[in-house]
Image (cartoon, rainbow, N blue to C red):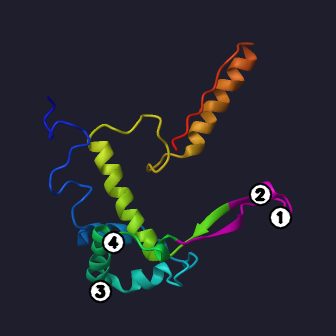
C-alpha cells in the first residue's frame, strides 16, 4: 500500500496548492506586473496596483482567499478577445494574434495559482521535459520548431513518419 505522503498527488492539510494565499505570494506577483499595458475589463491598470505599493496587499489577500474558499465568480472569468497586430500587412489575417482582455484582479489571482501549480509539479518531478507552455524561458514555439525539423528530416531522407496528437476532453 502506498502511503499518502509518498504519492505524488497526495497533500496534507496545507500543501502548496490549498494553503491560504500569503502576502509574500502577492508581493512576488506584483513585481511581475508591467506598466503601460491595457487596462483589464474592470478598467484597472497595473499602475493602480503598483503605485499603491503594499497598501492593497492585505485587501487582495482577503479577496483571493475568499475566492479559494468560495469559488470563482462569473464576472472574473469574463474576457473579450482583441486582435493584436503583430506586424506586416494590416490587411492580412495571419498578421494578427488574439489576446484576451479580462479583469486585472483575475490575472493577478491566476498568476498566483500558476506559480503554485508550477512549483508543486516541479517539486514532485511531474512536469514533462518537453513541456514548454507556462514555463520561464520556454516557448511553445520551441516545440513547433522541433516538430518542423523532424518533419523536414523525414522528407529529406524520404522516410515516412506518423504524428499523433492527443487532446484531453
Residue under circle 1?
Answer: 90
Say which label, 3 or 1, has the lower sequence index: 3
Q: In which quarter of the image is residue 37?
A: bottom right
Structural distance between the alpha carbons of marks 4 and 3: 20 Å
User: Going by the image, does 118 lie left or right of 161?
Assistant: left
Residue under circle 2?
Answer: 95
Say which label, 2 or 3, has the lower sequence index: 3
User: Going by the image, does 113 lie left or right of 102?
Assistant: left
Packing grade of label 3 (10 A; few <14, some 14-19, many >=20) is few
Residue depicted at 31% across the width and 78% down the height? 63
Mark number displayed over residue 67: 4
Magenta span contains residue 123 = no
Structural distance between the alpha carbons of marks 3 and 1: 43 Å
Q: Give the range drawn in magenta.
A: 78-97
Residue depicted at 27% across the width and 40% down the height? 124
Q: Are marks 2 and 1 in contact (CB under 8 Å)?
A: yes
Say which label, 2 or 4, has the lower sequence index: 4
Q: Which marked residue is nearer to the observer: mark 1 or mark 4? A: 4
Q: Do the residues labelled 2 and 4 touch (CB within 8 Å)?
A: no
Mark number displayed over residue 55: 3
- Determine whether the residue tagged by mark 1 lies in a helix, strand or loop: loop
Amino acid at each position: 500500500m502506498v502511503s499518502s505522503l509518498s504519492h505524488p498527488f497526495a497533500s496534507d492539510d496545507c500543501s502548496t496548492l490549498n494553503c491560504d494565499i500569503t502576502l509574500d505570494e502577492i508581493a512576488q506577483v506584483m513585481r511581475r506586473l508591467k506598466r503601460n499595458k491595457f487596462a483589464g475589463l474592470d478598467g484597472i491598470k497595473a499602475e493602480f496596483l503598483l503605485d499603491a505599493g503594499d497598501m492593497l496587499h492585505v485587501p487582495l489577500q482577503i479577496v483571493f482567499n475568499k475566492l479559494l474558499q468560495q469559488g470563482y465568480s462569473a464576472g472574473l472569468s469574463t474576457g473579450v478577445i482583441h486582435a493584436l497586430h503583430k506586424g506586416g500587412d494590416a490587411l492580412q489575417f495571419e498578421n494578427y494574434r488574439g489576446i484576451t482582455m479580462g479583469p486585472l484582479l483575475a490575472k493577478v489571482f491566476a498568476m498566483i495559482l500558476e506559480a503554485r501549480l508550477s512549483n508543486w509539479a516541479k517539486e514532485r518531478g511531474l512536469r514533462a521535459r518537453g513541456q514548454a507552455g507556462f514555463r520561464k524561458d520556454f516557448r511553445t514555439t520551441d516545440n513547433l520548431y522541433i516538430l518542423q525539423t523532424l518533419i523536414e528530416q523525414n522528407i529529406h531522407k524520404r522516410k515516412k513518419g506518423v504524428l499523433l496528437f492527443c487532446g484531453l476532453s
